[in-house]
Image (cartoon, rainbow, N blue to C red):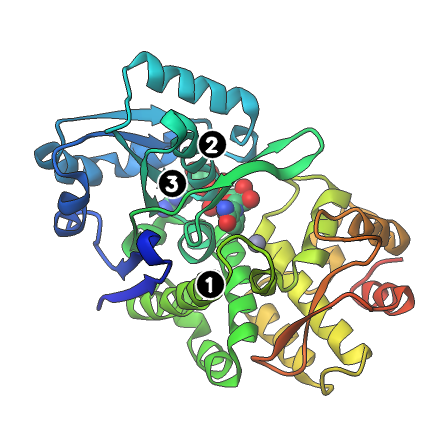
Amino acid sequence: MKKTVHVDLGSRSYEIVIAPELIQNSRTYLEPIIEGKRVAVVSDPWVSRNYQELLKNTLDPITSRWDLYLIQEGEDAKSFGCLEGLLDKMLADGIDRQCLVIAFGGGVVGDVAGFAAALLMRGIELIQIPTTLMSQVDSSVGGKNAINTRQGKNLVGSFLQPKIVLNDVSILSSLPANEMKSGYGEILKYGLLRGDKEFVWMEKNLSAIMNHDRDALVEVIRMGCETKASIVSEDERDKGKRALVNLGHTFAHAFETFAGFGRFQHGLSVGLGVIAAGLLSEKTGFCPEGITDRVKKHADDAGMPISLQSLHSETTWIKEELYQKMMHDKKTVNGRINFVLLEELGKPFVCNTVCKEMVLETLAEIGAV
Ligand SMILES: NC(=O)c1ccc[n+]([C@@H]2O[C@H](COP(=O)([O-])OP(=O)(O)OC[C@H]3O[C@@H](n4cnc5c(N)ncnc54)[C@H](O)[C@@H]3O)[C@@H](O)[C@H]2O)c1
Ligand SMILES: [Zn+2]
């Protein structure tokens, strides 16, 4: 089974291909783009150790030369130091305007490689071959990349759309359960953005997805990519509608900054953030009661945290301090916090008039003191 999602961005349009065993069968997709050019593959040690061979067999016959550049595993790689080291090595090797970068790894690799490609010669071509569920449904779609600074996460970055995204679902079979759940946090978000039909499908297919059933994975990744692609097509530069893909993220970012980055996976925080956004939508009267219970049950069935304690038991979650984190979120404007709320499944909207009391009550309901 193979699915393709078209990302419609005029001259920067591209395809996302989703299929099992795609990397070893990717020559038909890569050859027209690479056309004998020199390629820089950026990856992390784990991914390259386990999967480099798959890519090698495709790249050897269609490139003039390709080199592997490794960045360290984990969020710490999204730093000025690591980016500088990578650029330095690439330039010392004589990478020029004609070369092309392949990001081969999870969201961290995608962000660092994407930013490096955007900076080299003011922008060289990029191909994304994401290897985690999170990067297949979210970070490889839409052209954003970023590194972290001491002031916060993803504060320095750029936009660079890839030439193609290859989502090989077979590669997800080695992904640890927590990384699957993390990716599923973003999928949960897409299900709520889409509507009842998609959500019912997710309820029926949850165990197939979590057990790496290939057809279920292709379908759910298509749904996620299509949702993000259609929003990005309307608002590539994040001036308005793209805010909707941040459903649950105002809460999630507050949980992450409060507890400290790296304590738990981003997508787990998003899953709980989506539940909180649902509760807040009900509390403010925008959304009929009951929807959040359904979302909560689904997240629970997926084995995802449904309270702050289950997200991170060692943290004492203080609602007032979490609220202050939201006030300092980069999406907060003039002291007004932007929340994505729901009128019902499939009807999200941005609201910046929520009163503090309701936010604090919502935080208390998910376990903050
Ligand atoms: N640019 C965007 O639009 C965007 C969107 C969402 C998230 N992100 C970023 O993505 C990052 C998170 O990405 P992530 O969740 O993929 O984490 P990650 O890139 O850190 O990968 C998680 C771990 O999984 C390992 N791994 C990768 N592929 C594997 C596989 N197939 N089998 C087993 N292990 C594998 C990696 O080596 C790593 O240790 C964050 O930094 C986040 O800010 C960016
Ligand atoms: Zn996210």
Tell me which residue sits at (66%, 42%) in the image: 263
State the image quarter where residue 220 is shown.
bottom left
Give the answer, above or below, for where 205 lies relative to 71: below
The amino acid type of the residue labelled 1 equals Lys
Residue highlighted by disc 3 = 105
**Cα separation between marks 2 and 1:** 26 Å
Describe the element under mark 2 as helix, strand or loop: loop
The amino acid type of the residue labelled 2 equals Glu
Look at the image and tell me in which quarter the C terminus lies.
bottom right
Disc 1: CA contacts within 10 A as few (<14), some (14-19) or many (>=20): many
Image location (x, y in percent) of residue 12: 34, 52
Q: Choose between 282 and 212: the one closer to the eye.
A: 282
Q: Which mark is residue 228?
A: 1
Image location (x, y in percent) of residue 268: 60, 56
Residue highlighted by disc 2 = 73
Disc 3 under 8 Å from ligand 1? The reply is yes
Tell me which residue sits at (44%, 62%) in the image: 233
Residue 227 visible (yes or no)? yes
Give the answer, above or below, for where 83 lies relative to 348: above
